[in-house]
Image (cartoon, rainbow, N blue to C red):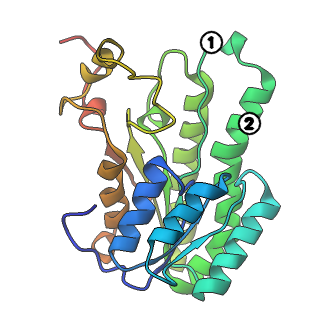
Amino acid sequence: MTVNRYAVEDGAVLVTGGGSGIGLAIAQAFLDNGARVAVSGRRTEPLERFVAAAPAGRALAVPGDVGAPADVERIVRRTVEAFGGLDVVVSNAAGYASGELADLAVPEWEALRRTNVDGLFHLAQATVPHLEASRGTLIAVASVSGLYGDWGQAAYNATKHAVVGFVQSLALDLGGRGVRVNAVAPAFTQTEMTAGVGADDDALAPFLDRIALGRPGLPEDVAPAVLFLASADAGYITGSVLTVDGGTSASTGQPR
């Protein structure tokens, strides 16, 4: 999963949305580097598969919905009880919705905001006291859609812009307490959530035309960046948003 080895051995890590896609790749990368990893998500089965494949006692599945404060409190409490504390928290759970603003129903917007924004808020509130105790780090999975605009994604982009602003401001508040807060910002990444976007070569072509490296991102591309930000090598990095986008955001948007 990672070319380099990161010194996270025996660290206590919590990854939300850890049952699939980018979250699963991040959880596996931490596990492969010797950390103890708790994964949460709304679907129990993929979480249990992750634990079943992990070395005994190194992984924990805690199903729950990050949009529900009581669930977040339970997820954090069970993780801390199992691991004795928290060193790294990865806020990865996210939803997606697209379409013109007039066509987006209020419940869709509320569900999107509940997961993408409220979920990060609840997670930070519940975990920051533990991260202060360990002088740990919080890393959010944002998006290049949280840095710029996209056609037909105003609601989604608004939530990801909120994630970026939250990370930057929280980094200022917590830096003096020894807690670092950063984000990674992927662009188009092939996961279950994006499976319908690049279903064939014709559908994928417009995305590839914007990617300098000529291929879509994979969850395994994002995971090493998260491990770096969690490591001592990133000890003077906080409030940063690291793009992991194959060069997508290097373009002004003008055609070739």
Q: Which residue: 62% across, 84% down? A: 82
Disc 2, SS: helix
Q: Quadrant of the C terminus?
A: top left
Q: Which mark is residue 100?
A: 1
Q: Amino acid at mark 1?
A: Glu
- Check the image and report above or below for 220 versus 129: above
Residue 16 visible (yes or no)? no
Name the residue nearer the viewer: 49 or 246.
Answer: 49
| Few, some or many residues within 10 Å of mark 2 (<14, 14–19, 20+) | some
In the rendered image, residue 58, in percent from the top left (x then y), is placed at 48, 80
Q: Which residue: 63% across, 54% down? A: 120
Q: Which mark is residue 212?
A: none
Question: In terms of image quadrants, where is residue 218?
Answer: top left
Q: Is residue 169 left or right of residue 3?
A: right
- Check the image and report above or below for 221 versus 231: above
Q: Amino acid at mark 2?
A: Ala
Q: Which residue is mark 2?
A: 111
Q: Which residue: 23% across, 74% down? A: 5
Q: CA distance from mark 2 to mark 1?
A: 17 Å
Name the residue nearer the viewer: 195 or 156.
Answer: 195
In the rendered image, residue 159, in percent from the top left (x then y), is placed at 61, 37
